[in-house]
Amino acid sequence: MTPATHPAPANVTSLAEHRLLHEAVIDRLRDLIVTGELAPEAKLNERVLAERLGTSRTPLREAIKFLASEGLVELVPNRGAMVAPLKPEKMREVFVVLGALEALAGELACRNASEADIADIRALHYHMLAHHARGELAPYFRYNQQIHQRILDCAGNATLSQTWRALNAHVRRARYMANLSRERWDQAVHEHEEMLDALSRRDGAKLQVLLRDHLANKLVLVIEALGGFAPKENA
Amino acid sequence: MTPATHPAPANVTSLAEHRLLHEAVIDRLRDLIVTGELAPEAKLNERVLAERLGTSRTPLREAIKFLASEGLVELVPNRGAMVAPLKPEKMREVFVVLGALEALAGELACRNASEADIADIRALHYHMLAHHARGELAPYFRYNQQIHQRILDCAGNATLSQTWRALNAHVRRARYMANLSRERWDQAVHEHEEMLDALSRRDGAKLQVLLRDHLANKLVLVIEALGGFAPKENA
DNA sequence: GCAATCTTTTTTGTATGCAAAATGAATTTA
DNA sequence: TAAATTCATTTTGCATACAAAAAAGATTGC
């Protein structure tokens, strides 16, 4: 379902599973940026990075260009590249666009998802609940992301998925900074309950609203974590 | 307003205006693909293309990776790259996503556009009308694209603009094939009248619907031109 | 001591070289 | 003749080499 150039968006550790080196470098580098191991605005020294990734500069530079198109790195003429800054204003923009994309996905998913799809998402939801109950943040996030991903997939629009994935990388990056209060965490889980409910009833209009609001709430957290100001009324 | 990596999306002929070669190659190659000079599914022979663009393989390969992320070229492991196919199903996907993005842009533009912005768009609109009246297709399209671009800009969300721009490249590519009947052309112009009207009244809800429908109608043309079937009910 | 200029070093941007894979042609075999 | 195999050519993928630009450091002048 995903294009050949994004074979494994998740945590890629081994380079061996990839046929091509530069594709492995793309995934590895994206991972370094998303996890924050390469901090925002960090300069990407090609020699150093290539050595760290066990490759030469050529595939690395190709990967950098690819990620520049995704917006995760910024190219500075004659000065190489740097990890894209993580500015509140940029996050606000990304969340607004993601809101529209997820709303669309929700509507389409309500039409196109099979009952088996919904059952799968429900299963993921309960896994997520379990980790929430135990206060296990990392696995919670993993299932959380998977749920959103599955909803996108159910929309049956690969281009939508692809676009969402690229923008969502920015959100995942910010997520490592936002520290979830128990209160806000409970609320997020509650929102997920409602989303699953709307999907089950195939109430596309409702799901749209829920997804948009869910993202809007997430944005507030991110903005707080980044030390920015409250978002404008339109989230 | 646009990122540094997309300095001139229009017809770039001279490479000299660019500081860096690989950025020039990106724009030049994108142009070749969008105009159809490089046909869909055409194989990108690195040696030949590099010579044609007056460069070596290295910057070309970097440009190819960049455009692969935009979806205009597809990478085939150990077989290089090819121009992305122009399939009806893919177009359907792109139009659906673009519909959501333009709807969002329309809503935001109604809120954020200054009166001067709207006046500018109105001016573009009348230019477009003039070319429509004279049956001049190419300039008509140019102003048409500019209007949509300006609406996006007025939304005040650079990420939205960027995302739209990348997807819109696919549409521009298809446009060169769709031959506009006079009847359909008149209708498109009428739709633009309504859009301008809604924007002037800052009726975001209305503009959203108009933009979505406008795109849906355009999709029908593209699908016809590609020899595909009618779109599904959700456009 | 500080600023400005020159020099050295590092880093980027591009071209080229080389090995592995793929393509295509020629030959063999059924 | 058609299929399969082998061999030659081409093409891709990666590494390295080299030149121009930028950054860092040393030197001079005030």
Image (cartoon, coloured by chain):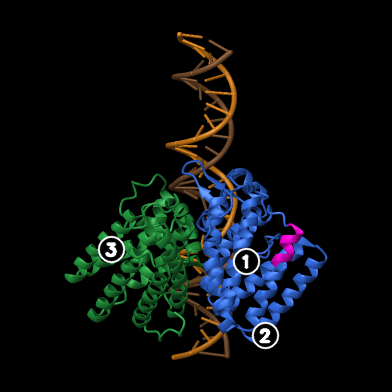
Chain colours: A blue, B green, C brown, D orange
Q: Which residue of the protein is positioned furthest toward the right in this rendering?
A: A134
Q: Kindly identify which residue carries mark 2.
A: A116
A9 versus B60 height, above or below: below
Q: Which residues are magenta?
A: A181-188
Residue A27 seen in this snapshot: no
Residues at discs 3 and 2 in contact (Cβ within 8 Å):
no
B105 versus A80 height, above or below: below
Q: Are marks 3 and 2 on the same chain?
A: no
Quarter of the image for residue B170 reads bottom left
Image spot of residue A112 (x, y percent): 57, 83
First in sequence, mark 1 or 2: give its number: 2
- From the viewer's side, name the closer residue of A79 and A91: A91
Q: Kindly identify which residue carries mark 1.
A: A214
User: Which mark's residue is nearer the viewer, 3 or 1?
Assistant: 1
Quarter of the image for residue B187 reads bottom left
Q: Kindly identify which residue carries mark 3.
A: B143
